Amino acid sequence: MGLPELNRRTFFKGAGALAATAVGAQLLVGCNASKVRGYGGSPRALPIPPVELGVREGNKVHFTLVAQAGDTQILPDVTTHTWGFNGTHLGPTLVMKSGDEVSVDVTNGLDEMTTVHWHGMKLPAVADGGPHSPIGAGQVWSPEWTVANEAATLWYHPHTHGLTGLHAYRGLAGMIIVEDEAATALDLPQDYGVDDIPLVLMDHRFLEDGSLDEEDLPDLGLLGDTPTVNGITNAHFAASTRRVRFRLLNGSNMRFFNMAFSDGRQFQVIASDTGLLDSPYEMSNLAIGPGERWEILVDLEPGEDVTLESVGFADNFGVPDDEFVPDFGMGDSFQLLTITGPAEDAATAPALPGLLVKSTVPDIIDAPERSFVLNTFSINDQQMDMQRVDVIIDHAEPEIWKVTNDNSDWPHNFHIHDARFKVVSFEGTDVELFNEGWKDTVGLPPGATATLAVEFGHYPDPTWPYMYHCHMLYHEDQGMMGQFVIVNPGDKPAVHLGSGAAAAGHEH
Ligand SMILES: [Cu+2]
């Protein structure tokens, strides 16, 4: 005697519409209109990942990271078994300066192997932390490099062969803030945790007992249904200033967020993945795919309430919205962070700087051009092979990489290690993505071709490869990844890559 199917559907549609107007995400719980769950309980203060300045002596700075397991209160009234660095969940924000000589001791306190990759950093491949740099349980890995990057928001996360998604999902992820003198001199909010706020965006699925649901969904892997910010649901930020800088990091496995404020207000985008934009761009919504970062400024009136949301992509990110296509969640809408404005007497925000950095574009006249065609779980019809070199770069100049999403109904994206790039053209799709500035990861709606002018860090080494891959982590773990080696002119890659000698059965 249940409701007729038609009525039930109508009811769900109505509930979805209510939730979409942000009357209350609570309504979403147990409702099928959206796959995304609302928040349980009352709002909790946004946790700010601890800042880690390292042990500094001049421009030498040493960091210590310990990967460990523990229990964390992601949900309001139950604990979840998670992984983290220097804590039970996520990791500290590492702060380093351009030109610093960095060393890190990464101790693996877990009971299984993992790796740590410095996403967005130009650095020698042996220090890059890809799948060739496993850290066994109880082992310590100690990479060193000099920070060649300009001021930017980068991050670190595992890059374990076939297990990157699961390890990140369990909580191994942290932010890196690179500072430089030019950026510090700008009149931008830069008081960490006060007006300069890291926001690590993720999504998870939970079982009844609060533990993480680690079952891969067909084609979607660990796409979550419950959004978290800095490791909790239903986070609230009480601003103390009228202008706030949010450093957005999409640390999710598979989800594209479409950031907007509940009242549609405009905000200023000031930085992309790997550095400041030439000038602030006023936007009212902004896509951020897995692995990407954006920095935004938002102005707040004293005492007001506003919510940072992810809203459904109007065009469903170019993904057909039908029963034959997996639901990548492109139409989902949900609240991420409720925000309260500052006190009445908070100082007025200064005028925005008109110019942030002097824009440069890589010189790509006569640059070598390569194509990468992404389809389902392969790139150029091949899947990841730890001992195959896909690309040899034997020079220090920029290259043109033409990257195509050849699937008609799946989204992908593309990340290049040891590099920064500018998107010089974006074709083959009606989806409009904001692609200004230096990036290391670009979103690819179905059919899209992004032409990238890529600058690589030049650290010739025939033995250690770098990765390029889809940063939708289930895709990466299914083999959607290739390897490039940077060598001196005329040199060839080593016969056995990285720890390949051991892998091939040779004794050291
Ligand atoms: Cu992909």
Image (tube, helix red, strand yellow):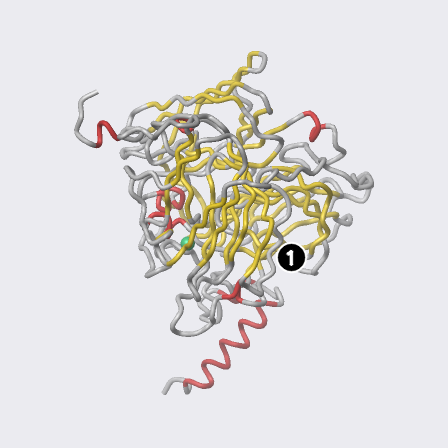
Q: Quadrant of residue 344?
A: top right
Disc 1 crowd rating (10 Å Cα; few below 14, some 14-19, many 20+) is: many
Identify the residue shown where x is 59% and y is 51%: 337
Of 222 and 35, the residue lying toward us: 222
Q: Position of residue 421 (x, y in %)?
A: 56, 41
Task: Determine the secondary structure under disc 1.
Answer: loop
Q: Position of residue 490 (x, y in %)?
A: 40, 28
Amino acid, disc 1? Asn
- Image quadrant where one finds the N terminus: bottom left
Q: Residue at x 36, y 24 (%)?
A: 141
Which of 56/71 is in front?
Answer: 56
Q: Quadrant of ligand 1?
A: bottom left
In the drawing, does residue 394 fall left or right of residue 297? left
- Asked whether, in this view, residue 434 is left or right of residue 501, the answer is right
- x 39%, y 21%: residue: 142
What residue is pinned by disc 1? 285
Position above or below: 396 against 298: above
| Residue 213 against residue 160 in the figure, above or below | below
Query: Quadrant of the image for the C terminus?
Result: top left
Q: Is there any visible trace of residue 49 in the rendered image?
A: no
Q: Position of residue 417 (x, y in %)?
A: 46, 37
Q: Residue at x 56, y 12 (%)?
A: 57
Q: Visible in this render: residue 482?
A: yes
In screen coordinates, is 280 left or right of 30?
A: right
Above or below, 443 against 31 in this view is above
> Number of numbered discs present?
1
The image quarter in which residue 5 lies: bottom left
x, y percent for residue 216 = 32, 55
- Residue situated in front as seen by the camera: 249 or 227: 249
